[in-house]
Image: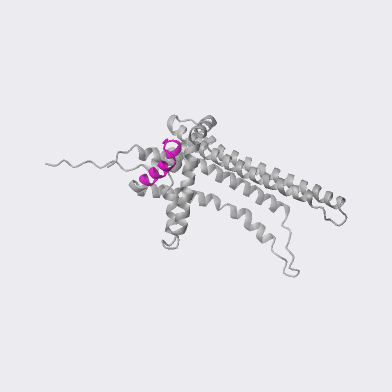
């Protein structure tokens, strides 16, 4: 008599979502890395633009004073060199900030699932230990994105829709799972293939939450567009009222902060589901 092999219990993705929300509420600092990285990038960009405008004004006056005919462009050429160097610095700093945010977010989410609490020190430790693997994994995802873009028309854009699904466990595997870059991509593919339905349902829920939050941006943009429509008689754009400007600005900032906070919750869910699926034996 052959004894049938008992089937493994179903994946409790509903319980993972519920536990992820509870962990995220208790450890809201998981959302801080994305907020801090965005603030750093924004501050550097604003400072760069302000310095560039100031230098352009000073260089323009110097060029006019040095040559009555405006023929001396050495000052403006110097500004161009400084602008190029500054742009490169901004790009490098932004890449480092985003890399730190990714490693720190998933490192803190993994710490929350491991011991119930997460602090920024956990994120810094994850960045120091797993930044290399995350960089390699990111390069691999970019390569897959190019392949998906090439296959977009032959697959009726299914390749572009499948890419975020099959790579949803890459960062949890690279940070919490201690996989190398390409190994994390392979592990994500393997888990999605073995547990396709739980992965798909979780991904759709996360996408629905993100879409719902980003939809709030319409309340910040659409009223301004209608208020600024040209006057029918003169054809001149109208100035929206100041209260509407304030409402739209506050709504826009709040929505961006909610989207950044959502990144922390999404990382918590992905890490939790990754740990749930990793613990299951291979059939």
- Residues 72 and 217: in front is 72
Residue at the far left in the pictured view: 1
Q: Horizontal placement of 242 versus 145: left or right?
A: right
The answer to whether 62 is drawn above or below residue 232 in the figure is above
Q: Name the image quarter holding residue 48.
A: top right
The answer to whether 119 is drawn above or below residue 102 in the figure is above
> x and y percent of residue 106 in the render?
48, 38
Q: Horizontal placement of 197 versus 240: left or right?
A: left
Residue at the far bottom in the pictured view: 233
- Quadrant of the snapshot with the C terminus: top left
Q: Name the image quarter holding residue 120.
A: top right
Number of numbered discs visible in the structure rendering: 0
- Residues 218 and 179: in front is 179
Q: Horizontal placement of 114 versus 249: left or right?
A: left
> x and y percent of residue 145 in the render?
47, 52
- Residues 42 and 10: in front is 42
Q: Horizontal placement of 220 versus 30: left or right?
A: right
The answer to whether 193 is drawn above or below residue 110 in the figure is below
> x and y percent of residue 121 in the render?
53, 29
> x and y percent of residue 22 in the render?
46, 36
Magenta extent: 173-191
Q: Name the image quarter holding residue 69.
A: bottom right
Q: Residue at x 18, y 42 (%)?
A: 4
- Quadrant of the snapshot with the N terminus: top left
The answer to whether 236 is drawn above or below residue 175 in the figure is below
What secondary structure prevails in the magenta region? helix
Residue 259 among those drawn in magenta: no
Colouring mode (rainbow / by chain / secondary structure / one colour)? one colour
């Amino acid at each position: 008599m052959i004894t049938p092999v008992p089937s493994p219990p179903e994946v409790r993705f509903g319980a993972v979502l519920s536990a992820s929300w509870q962990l995220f509420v208790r450890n809201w600092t998981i959302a801080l890395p994305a907020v801090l990285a965005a603030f750093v990038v924004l501050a550097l960009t604003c400072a760069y633009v302000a310095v560039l405008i100031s230098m352009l004004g000073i260089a323009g006056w110097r060029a006019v004073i040095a040559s009555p005919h405006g023929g001396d462009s050495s000052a403006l050429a110097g500004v161009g060199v400084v602008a190029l160097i500054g742009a490169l610095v901004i790009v490098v700093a932004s890449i480092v900030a985003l890399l730190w945010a990714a490693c720190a977010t998933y490192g803190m989410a993994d710490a929350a699932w491991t011991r119930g609490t997460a602090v920024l020190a956990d994120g810094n430790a994850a960045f120091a230990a797993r930044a290399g693997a995350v960089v390699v994994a990111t390069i691999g995802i970019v390569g897959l994105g190019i392949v998906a873009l090439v296959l977009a028309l032959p697959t009726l854009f299914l390749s572009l829709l499948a890419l975020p699904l099959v790579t949803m466990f890459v960062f949890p595997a690279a940070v919490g799972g201690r996989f190398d870059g390409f190994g994390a991509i392979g592990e994500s593919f393997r888990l999605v293939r073995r547990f396709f339905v739980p992965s798909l349902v979780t991904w759709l829920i996360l996408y629905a939450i993100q879409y719902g939050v980003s939809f709030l941006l319409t309340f910040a943009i659409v009223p301004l567009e209608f208020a600024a429509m040209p006057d029918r008689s003169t054809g001149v754009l109208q100035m929206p009222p100041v209260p509407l400007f304030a409402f739209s600005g506050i709504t826009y900032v709040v929505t961006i902060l909610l989207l950044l906070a959502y990144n922390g919750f999404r990382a918590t869910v992905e890490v939790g589901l990754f740990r749930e699926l990793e613990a299951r034996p291979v059939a």
